[in-house]
Image (spheres, grey):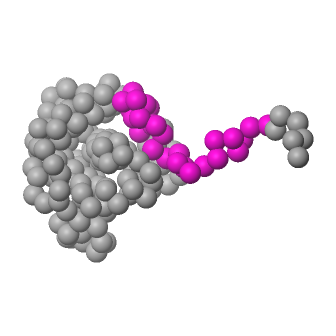
Amino acid sequence: MIAFDLTIEGGEWGDEAALATLIERTLATAAPHIVDGLPEDAETSFLFTNDEAVRVLNRDWRGQDKPTNVLSFAANEGGGPVTPLLGDIAIAQETVAREAEEQAKSFDNHLTHMIVHGLLHLIGHDHENDTEADEMEALERRILADLSMADPYADPYADPYADTEPLGADLR
């Protein structure tokens, strides 16, 4: 199991105990998928906050003066082996809520995806190029499927029959 600290400093996150339970379930499900990159006594911290706080972090640490859904600050930033202290994850409530609505997903499912995404960054995964993105997204899909969640990258508005062959009947 991955130990974690939880801090809520902004946003409308609701019940802290429910949030802790969601994190615990997500980390427990993710851990077996990342065992090769994970120290036995791994721990991380979560900051659940608002868009403004994440905007400042994004500006100060990534040079992008805008909010984003999740930021990861790996303890081994710049490479090297993953240490037991994995690093920190900050999540912006308003951005996660807006994206969930835009993508026709539940808030909890999208938040779970952001937790997984942030965790994978802490152990060295990235999406700077197509190969890295494909690998990271495949791992996210496997972890989320184990949580009984749909593919987070699938288009919720796609025609489910778009890739099927017509039946051949002309019903006009």
Image quarter hosting the N terminus: top left
Q: Position of residue 36 (x, y in %)?
A: 33, 28
Is 97 positioned to the left or the right of 127 in the image? Answer: left
Residue 73 shows in the view? no
**What residue is shown at x 74% (from left), y 37% (from top)?**
164
Image position, residue 88 (x, y; %): 18, 49
- The quadrant in which residue 17 appears is top left
Q: Residue furthest front?
A: 172
On screen, residue 110 versus residue 137, left or right, reads left
Q: Is residue 161 magenta?
A: yes
Residue found at x 49% / y 47%: 153
Q: How many marks?
A: 0
**Res. 47 visible in picture:** yes
Stretch in magenta: 139-165
Rendered view: 144 above or below 98: above
State the image quarter where residue 58 is shown.
Answer: bottom left
**The residue positioned farthest toward the bottom in the image shown:** 65
**Considering depth in this image, is 117 or 80 the residue closer to the camera?**
117
